[in-house]
Amino acid sequence: MLILPIIWTLLLTPVRAAEVEHASLIEVEAAYSPEVSGWQKQEIVWRPEWIARFESGMRLTLLGEGRLDAKDELDPGRPDQPFRAGLTQKSFPGDHADVELREFYLDNYVGDAFVRLGKQQIVWGQADGLRVLDVLNPLSYREFILPDIEHRRIPLWSALTEIPLDNGTAQIVWIPDATVTKSTLPGATYSLIPDPFAGEGRLEVDRPDSFAKSDFGLKLSTFQQGWDLSLNYLYHTIDDPLIQFDPSEQLIRADYNRSHLIGGTASKPFGDVTFRSEIGLESEKRSLDPATGQVRKSEVASYVLGLDYSGFSDWFVSTQFFQTYRFSTERDEEPSDEQFTLLVRRDAMNNALSLEVLGIYDLNNRDSLIQLEAEYSVSTNVVLRTGADLFFGKRTGTFGQFHDESRLSAGFTLSF
């Protein structure tokens, strides 16, 4: 895949690095679920980073991740990886350990154009956590949506080019990596794949082929009269699957379709308040009629409106409203889904202590997730952390389904 152009470029270029930098982050965290009276995880994660800068101006970045989890409840054993393309898969040295090449990319300038080749994250949009345009990288649901989205995105082998224009920038994206959103398999703590066959079923993932079903994107961005604006287009595979069942073969099938995504963003600060907005229209999303089992297709529009306020000293408040609207519905099906988020952050003790509350409320299912976190910086390279992830609502809801998995957590981060 794109690892070959990187190696080829290095072979054709004087490879004497002017500087090699290394940094590492070690996170130790344990999470306990009171409802089931058991530990959800007891893990150590090592995230090393190397950056090599060459005399030619090129820069090579490598980010790795190694995990050791004593409990092994979140993604048990050495699971199959049907959602990942071959060069994007993890390695499992044992049932309790996994190793992953998170990112590996080469940066260079060709004239005035910036080029990045390799395994990377490409972030679009203005929304915080709620995805409208930020769909270039699929997500991992190993811990549902609890970790920061930077750690939930699955980096893909991609090519990105940014070309300066008179009044802005054009970004061209090519993603030949057909990895899709990863849900843990049935039986894992936060599995999103229903299993009507009581563990006897077989999962078949009809994932598209890499290269043959590449994603292509174009983003035009500009800054006009205080407004940060963008216009986005993406031809891609919808990363969230359509799940179907075949009782005769006890088969669970995950299927995917292609779609055109058109949208844009607009944001502007007004004193202490920043307004953010994002909108996107998918040409085709599919769903399954639970009554008939028929596959339904529809255009789907999504948008986010957000306000950030930083007028109080050491306080930050952010709120967002998210809506998804389906243009074709059946029977008594609701055409739209809405969610509301509220984030409150307080810094104290000369920024050594950070307190944060994040709430997400689903207006349709009337269920919610509340995340509480406190961080204390003991020194520049040691941070203590404690928190809680609390699910509320009906067990059929987006968040209520994990009511029993509400958890308390504690840990620390060491950087060097």
Image (spheres, grey):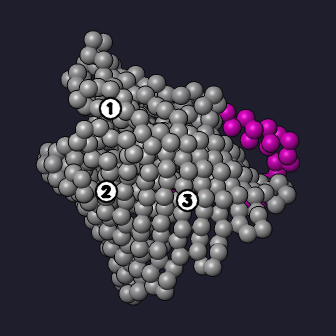
Taking the image as drawn, is residue 122 in sight? no
**With 340 as the anchor, is 254 left or right in this view?**
right
Give me the residue at 46% from left, 31% from top.
256
Q: Position of residue 33 (x, y in %)?
A: 19, 50
Measured in 3D between alpha carbons, the distance from the residue under mark 1 to the one under mark 3, in whole angstroms, is: 29 Å
Tell me the crowding category of disc 1: few under 14, some 14 to 19, or many 20 or more residues within 10 angstroms, Cα based.
Answer: some
* Front position in the image: 400 or 100: 400
- Tell me the tag on residue 338: 2
Q: Residue furthest top?
A: 248
- The residue tagged 1 is 288
Taking the image as drawn, is residue 224 in sight? yes
* Front position in the image: 42 or 205: 205
Dot 3 amino acid type: Gly
Measured in 3D between alpha carbons, the distance from the residue under mark 3 to the one under mark 2, in whole angstroms, is: 19 Å
Give the structural element (helix, strand or loop) at label 2.
Answer: strand
Q: Are marks 3 and 2 in contact (CB under 8 Å)?
A: no
